[in-house]
Image (tube, rainbow, N blue to C red):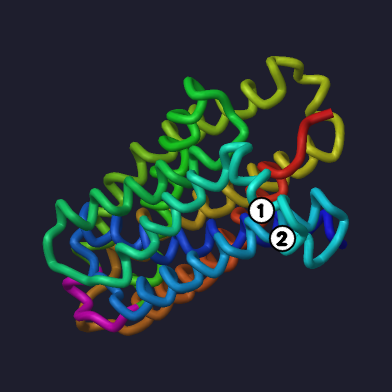
Amino acid sequence: MMDSLPIIARLMILISATLTAGGGLAAVIFGLPALKRVQRFGALLGIVSCVFYFSSQAALLTGRWDGVFVPGIAHLLWQLGGGATLLFVVFAFLLFLFHHENRLLLLGKSCLLLIGIAWLSHLTLLQKPVLFLHLLLALIWAGVILPFLKPMQSATLAQMAHRFGRVAVLILPVLFVAGGTLVWIRTDGDLQALWGNWGLAMTGKLAFVMLAGAIGLRNKLKIVPEISDAYDAPVKAFRSAMVVDALIFLTILGFSAWLSNNTPV
């Protein structure tokens, strides 16, 4: 049970990043509405998640639920390098408590948060930019889901969906390349490692990513071209697809949290 604490903490951080940085990137790139309350909730959840992550590391190190209060443990974890990075992530989450209309600032704090999360990983300095790129592209995709569920005129919805569809065609191939590079890095090029539990989890994650891509392709080719003020059915179908996408991405984040906390064997 205690081994699962860091996984839960990582999942909470990724969900918080989706609500904050993902929503911010969606607003900047696609002009979708910035959900202020959602971003503030995500920021608060992110701060709590960071505290929980630090506490979970202490619990794992000491074998005690209250390990963070054991004398010297918190200082030791800080000295190991994770403390300063975690504090940076907390600072980035804090920035999302303050809303503003400047898109450049919104883009900047979104990227700052993703840089901090990438630096929390156990990858080397030269490998972390690949993880940052992977996170950036994944959250650009996931960040549109909640804004698309917000009520808006059919013409506006169709315009935004068309814009996202054009960008998604470019995002998906690069996302796969970045993800494949990360798998190669984590396994040191030894594909035998993919036959274990880690490989099965990676296969599961890939299957859900492909499912999300298939739903996106259906939206782009069939549903979005039919959206208009004259018919409600395409709009309802599109919003239903977004709900399914939300559940799929939540599952993908769960796989990602588990994969990042385990080593290929």
> Which dot marks residue 68?
2
Q: Nearer the viewer, residue 199 or 99?
A: 99
- Percent from the top left, x then y, of residue 236? 40, 80
Quadrant where the N terminus is found in the figure: bottom right
Residue shown at the point (36%, 71%) measured from the top left? 39
> Which dot marks residue 181?
none
The picture quadrant where one finds residue 7 is bottom right
Q: Outermost residue, top direction?
A: 189
* Residue 151 colored in magenta in the image: yes
Q: Residues within 10 Å of mark 1 (few under 14, many from 20)?
A: some
Q: Can residue 163 be seen by looking at this rendering?
A: yes
Q: Outermost residue, front direction?
A: 71
Residue shown at the point (18%, 55%) measured from the top left? 105
According to the picture, the residue beneath numbered tag 1 turns out to be 74
Q: Where 152 sits versus 86, above or below?
A: below
Residue shown at the point (16%, 68%) measured from the top left? 100
Quadrant where the C terminus is found in the figure: top right
The picture quadrant where one finds residue 124 is top right
Tag 1, which secondary structure? helix
Q: Residues within 10 Å of mark 2 (few under 14, many from 20)?
A: many
Q: Check contact, mark 2 vs mark 1: CB within 8 A.
A: yes
How far apart are the two marked residues, 2 and 1, measured between alpha carbons? 6 Å
Is 75 left or right of 176, judged from the image as shown?
right
Is 173 left or right of 262, judged from the image as shown?
left
Is 73 left or right of 249, judged from the image as shown?
right
Q: Amino acid at mark 1?
A: Ala
Q: Amino acid at mark 2?
A: Val
Indicate which disc, 2 or 1, sits on the residue closer to the N terminus: 2
- Percent from the top left, x then y, of residue 73? 72, 51
Residues shaded magenta: 150-157
